[in-house]
């Protein structure tokens, strides 16, 4: 407040008073006439707080930016005060708050100039390192990666790393370097002075606010200076930062701290400090880019100011979308990233020089972001990149080889690959990550020739070893195989090919031999298939008609035999005539409901089969003996000669009549009521009326069909035998010899 051009000197001359400022007491004294002293004090208050055409603007700057604002010996402040006559700029030594006082219009212009200067000012920061860290950094390219990521210039020295760039970029670069050296990542959320004081007061009274975030994310959260400091593992820090903003600050500072999220591909264009500074000067809000959460942070004590800034940032993002092109590559094309960058970044630098565009590589997302100041330049950059990729695909190709073909292709000592490389003047490499894939590099024409040579070799190898496969049906397989496989063997022997028939997959494969011989084998097999199709298309006789025909044949029974039921035996004239397996009749009961689900049916059938097997093992009765017993039961005369094999059991249907001339409906085909109900009982456990007396011999149930009783044999089909323990066991024996153990009473 001192100096010849200070406010004190001005009021002394203007109001004819004596004014002085006591620094120890922070006290201003004015002496003179009362009215003049009062007027002088009013001018001083207006200068300090604004009013009556005078404006006062205060804002904080970062420590590193403070020096840039002041300049060497205060040169930068002097230039601003000279340019904007009537304003005063004050930067105290003990804090980073800049104060601008003067006419309202000049203060606003000066403020805009200062904010832009601070935002675009390049700062320098040194990071101290030891010899071991220097050795670690010198052996890696981490410095180059971070430098390109953060748009900073980094120099590695033996004892330090010098980082130069924009303030936010330098801060981000420093955090990445420290993480690489120590494993700890540091993140910050900067606040306005009044905002920070409120947060500090709340956390001091209740530390659980930050403790809960620490427990849930694993990152440490503290407050220091004018910011919230978060440190730990990078992923934890990012999670904690998002939680602090969304859960804590949104409650403490409603609408006074807002974020505008974006995709990381927009970070570079949206992080332009000059454009963000313009929005800050228009709205009066503080604006910064936060790369950790891919957002622009907007803060102000006035919520309406923040809302206005958010709208302008969103408009800026729409414009940035027009000035960028994002090209994303599949994982199979990740090799193109190194091609685009080139050795030492030579390729991408050449692209940027030719197109006046910026090309940013996001390797972990396999993405290239093209940005420029106009849409025309962006389109030119995209076209140049497309041409580079097209040429790269012609000069570098990948071919997958069958794994079983690799030894033959590579050859002894790599002779096969060496020959391919020499014949076509290309470089052939086997991929480490994918051993079955080879990479061919060279000029476009030579790579094409090598590719054709490899594909021809693979085709020939597959024809010899994998073969030609055709699909079959179950009906075609017997004709192709022939009796004992004679047909397919003769075709293989004639053509010199190996022919495999897979009954499970219903396929036939012809392999080995020459191409012409394989084609010949396929032709012969297709001829057999065509013949089978033609044969299958001929008219066929209805099976039902063939079954019904024998029913009309009249059968004369041998003398001395008595009348029997509908399951009587019949001996055909030709003993060699093929006989029908009785089990087929049992299994083919169309229209019979057995009840229960599939599992119950299966279990019941298996249980019945086990009981039959057990019975046969206990009694030792063979199938032939059972048939003989059946014949003996049929013959009423008891003649021993009628039991012989001269009268085998036949299932050819006959027509039998009872005394009342009532005809049964082909029981040999459809089965008797007893047979059907017995089968249903075996499967479901349900006892029908027809077999109730058999299953429960002591019950009072009576047959509902008297004619059936009249037609049945007098002999009791229930047999009682003793088991190994001497216990009586009841069995039901059918005329065919089928035995079923009955439940005990």
Image (spheres, helix red, strand yellow):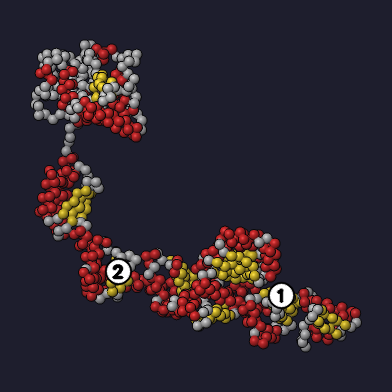
Q: Are marks 1 and 2 in contact (CB under 8 Å)?
A: no
Please tell me whether mark 2 sits on a helix, a strand or a loop: strand
Within 10 Å of disc 1 (Cα), the crowding (few <14, some 14-19, many 20+) is: some
Q: Nearer the viewer, mark 1 or mark 2?
A: 2
Using residue 469 as the reference point, say whether residue 106 is left or right of it. Answer: right
425, 530: nearer the viewer: 425
**Which residue is at 64% across, 68% downward?**
223
216, 102: nearer the viewer: 216
Outermost residue on the top side: it is 660
**Which residue is at 21% across, 69% downward?**
412
- Place of residue 444 in the rendered image (x, y in percent of width and height, measured from the top left): 30, 73
- Place of residue 19 in the rendered image (x, y in percent of width and height, measured from the top left): 84, 83
Within 10 Å of disc 2 (Cα), the crowding (few <14, some 14-19, many 20+) is: some
Using residue 395 as the reference point, say whether residue 200 is left or right of it. Answer: right
Report which residue position mark 2 lands on: 430
Please tell me whether mark 1 sits on a helix, a strand or a loop: strand
> Counting residues from the N terminus, which is met first, the one under dot 1 or under dot 2?
1
Name the image quarter holding residue 302: bottom right
Quarter of the picture containing the N terminus is bottom right
Name the image quarter holding residue 213: bottom right
Q: Using the image, determine if residue 231 lies above or below residue 125.
A: above
300, 132: nearer the viewer: 132
- Place of residue 118 in the rendered image (x, y in percent of width and height, measured from the top left): 62, 78
- Is residue 261 shown to the viewer in this render? no
509, 391: nearer the viewer: 509
Instruction: Give me the disc on residue 57.
Output: 1
**Which residue is at 22% across, 60% downward?**
462
């Amino acid at each position: 407040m001192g100096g010849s051009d200070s406010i004190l000197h001005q009021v002394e001359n203007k109001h004819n008073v004596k004014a002085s400022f006591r620094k120890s007491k922070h006290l201003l004294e004015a002496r003179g006439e009362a009215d003049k002293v009062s007027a002088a004090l009013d001018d001083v208050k207006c200068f300090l707080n604004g009013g009556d055409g005078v404006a006062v603007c205060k804002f904080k700057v970062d420590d590193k930016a403070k020096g840039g604002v002041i300049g060497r010996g205060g040169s930068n402040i002097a230039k601003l005060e000279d340019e904007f006559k009537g304003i005063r700029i004050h930067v105290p030594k003990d804090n980073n708050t800049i104060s601008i006082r003067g006419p309202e219009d000049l203060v606003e212009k000066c403020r805009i100039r200062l904010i832009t200067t601070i935002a675009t000012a390049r700062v320098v920061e040194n990071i101290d390192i030891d010899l071991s860290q220097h050795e670690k950094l010198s052996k890696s390219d981490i410095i180059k990666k971070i430098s390109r990521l953060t748009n900073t210039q980094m120099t590695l020295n033996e004892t330090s790393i010098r980082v130069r760039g924009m303030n936010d970029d330098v801060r981000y670069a420093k955090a990445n370097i420290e993480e690489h050296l120590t494993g700890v990542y540091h993140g910050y959320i900067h606040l306005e002075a009044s905002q920070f004081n409120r947060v500090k007061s709340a956390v001091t009274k209740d530390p659980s606010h930050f403790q809960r975030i620490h427990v849930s994310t694993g990152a440490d959260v503290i407050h220091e200076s004018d910011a919230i400091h978060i440190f730990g593992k990078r992923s934890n820090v990012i999670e904690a930062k998002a939680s602090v903003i969304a859960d804590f600050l949104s409650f403490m500072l409603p609408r006074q701290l807002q974020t505008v999220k974006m995709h990381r591909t927009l970070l570079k264009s949206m992080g332009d400090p000059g454009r963000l500074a313009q929005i800050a000067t228009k709205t009066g809000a503080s604006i910064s880019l936060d790369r950790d959460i891919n957002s622009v942070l907007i803060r102000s004590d006035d919520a309406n100011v923040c809302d206005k800034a958010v709208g302008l940032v969103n408009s800026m993002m729409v414009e940035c979308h027009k000035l960028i092109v994002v090209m994303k590559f599949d994982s199979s094309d990740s090799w193109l990233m190194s091609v685009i960058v080139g050795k030492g970044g030579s390729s991408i630098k050449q692209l940027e020089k030719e197109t006046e565009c910026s090309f940013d590589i996001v390797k972990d997302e396999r993405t290239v972001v093209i940005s420029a100041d106009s849409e025309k330049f962006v389109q030119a950059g995209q076209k140049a990149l497309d041409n580079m990729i097209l040429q790269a695909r012609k000069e570098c190709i990948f071919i997958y080889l069958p794994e079983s073909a690799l030894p033959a292709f590579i050859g002894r000592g790599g002779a096969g690959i060496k020959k391919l490389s020499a014949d076509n003047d290309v470089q052939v490499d086997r991929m480490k990550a994918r051993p079955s894939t080879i990479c061919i590099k060279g000029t476009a024409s030579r790579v094409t020739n090598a590719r054709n040579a490899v594909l021809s070799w693979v085709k020939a190898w597959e024809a010899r070893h994998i073969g030609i496969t055709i699909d079959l049906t179950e009906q075609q397989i017997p004709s192709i195989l022939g009796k004992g496989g004679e047909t397919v063997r003769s075709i293989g022997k004639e053509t010199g090919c190996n022919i495999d028939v897979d009954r499970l997959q219903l396929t036939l494969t012809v392999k080995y031999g020459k191409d012409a011989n394989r084609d010949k084998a396929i032709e012969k097999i297709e001829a057999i298939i065509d013949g089978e199709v033609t044969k299958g298309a001929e008219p066929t006789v209805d099976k039902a008609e063939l079954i019904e025909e024998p029913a009309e044949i009249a059968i004369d029974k041998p003398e001395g035999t008595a009348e029997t039921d509908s399951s009587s035996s019949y001996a055909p004239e030709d003993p060699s005539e093929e006989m029908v397996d009785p089990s087929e009749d049992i299994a083919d009961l169309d229209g019979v409901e057995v009840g229960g689900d599939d599992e119950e049916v299966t279990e019941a059938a298996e249980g019945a089969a086990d009981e039959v097997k057990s019975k046969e093992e206990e009694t030792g009765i063979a199938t032939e003996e059972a048939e003989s017993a059946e014949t003996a039961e049929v013959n009423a005369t008891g003649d021993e000669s009628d039991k012989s094999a001269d009268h085998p059991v036949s299932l050819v249907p006959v027509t039998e009549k009872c005394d009342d001339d009532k005809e049964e409906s082909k029981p040999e085909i459809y089965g008797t009521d007893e047979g059907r109900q017995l089968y249903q009982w075996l499967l479901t456990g349900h006892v029908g009326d027809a077999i109730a007396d058999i299953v429960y011999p002591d019950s009072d149930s009576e047959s509902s069909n008297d004619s059936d009783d009249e037609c049945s044999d007098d002999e009791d089909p229930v047999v009682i035998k003793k088991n190994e323990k001497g216990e009586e066991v009841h069995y039901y024996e059918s005329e065919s010899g089928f035995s079923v153990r009955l439940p005990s009473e």
